[in-house]
Each structure stands twice: as C-alpha cells, then as structure tokens.
Amino acid sequence: MIKYLKINMKTLLRRIVKLTFFLFCISLFSCSKDSDADITLDVDQSTLTFQPGVETRSFEITTSAEWNITSAELSHSFGGSFAETDWFRISPVYGKGNATITITTKEDSKKNNIELRIEYGTQVMTVTLIQN
C-alpha cells in the first residue's frame, strides 16, 4: 500500500509540474503588447507661426501611447521635461497620453524655422515652427 501511495504521489507531482508548465506557456504567449500599428497619435496643428520676439503658442497631442519630441537643434535639459534652441523653449518634450505642448519664443528672435519630430512607437509625425 505504501509503495502504491508513493507511485501515485510521484505521478500526481509530475502531473502538477506538467500542468504548471502548460499554464505558464499559455500565459506567456497570450500576453502581448499593442503593436505599433494599433497605436494612434493625433496632433491638432501641423504648423505654428510666430511673430518676431517673445510669443507663446501651443498644440495638443492626443494618444494613449508614450511619445517623444525631437529635433537636431533641440538641447534637452538634464532630468527635465523641456528643451530649447537659441530661439525657443518647448515643454514637455516627452510623456504618455494626451498633452498640451507649449512653445515660447525668445526675445530678439526672428526669421527661424524648425521641424519637430513627434515619435511614438516606430512611427513619426511632424510639426513645423516658423518665425517671421
């Protein structure tokens, strides 16, 4: 009887291990991140025009994804959520979800333009800033 019980306990233990492994595999393959094709991002402005000197304008980002604003001319603050060039400051430059992006031009600035890249996933949208 004891020998029979040991065999059944071994069998039961093997079955539990197999079932646990099977459930682990199912949970591993059933969980997936949203693909980039499912991510949407909308920007309410494609171009912002500024007058010479100090002026503030904004645009809206609408998304549920993480996003990042880049440009070759932008100098990002260390640990901050803003960036700037020699003629404007922008904030925030990264985030997740909806946001209002604010751009303020600097005093004595004029005749500038730049293309901002809004990156989300592997996709990109652009907003052009023009200063007369």
Image: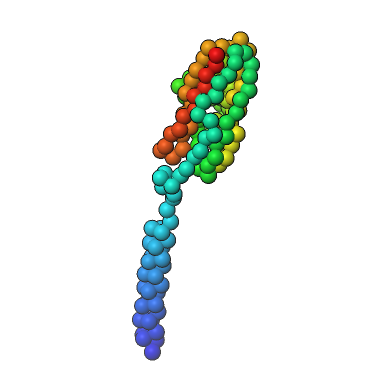
Q: Which residue is depicted at the point 38% across and 61% down?
A: 25
Q: Quadrant of the C terminus?
A: top right
Residue extending farthest top: 108
Counting from the top left corner in percent of width and height, residue 37 is at 40, 45
Q: Image check: 20 left or right of 129?
A: left
Q: From the viewer's perspective, is residue 71 above or below residue 121?
A: above
Q: Is residue 112 visible?
A: yes
Q: Quadrant of residue 12?
A: bottom left
Q: Which residue is depicted at the point 51% across and 25% down?
A: 47
Counting from the top left corner in percent of width and height, residue 14 is at 36, 73
Q: Is residue 74 visible?
A: no
Query: Number of marks in the image?
Result: 0
Q: From the viewer's perspective, is residue 113 above or below residue 21?
A: above
Q: Which residue is depicted at the point 53% across and 12% down?
A: 111
Q: Quadrant of residue 26?
A: bottom left
Q: Which residue is depicted at the point 48% across and 20% down?
A: 114
* Color style of the picture: rainbow
Counting from the top left corner in percent of width and height, residue 65 is at 50, 42
Foreground of the two, 22 or 112: 112
Residue extending farthest bottom: 1
Foreground of the two, 125 or 2: 125
Counting from the top left corner in percent of width and height, residue 95 is at 55, 37
Q: Quadrant of the N terminus?
A: bottom left
Q: From the viewer's perspective, is residue 68 above or below residue 132?
A: below
Q: Image check: 75 left or right of 56?
A: left
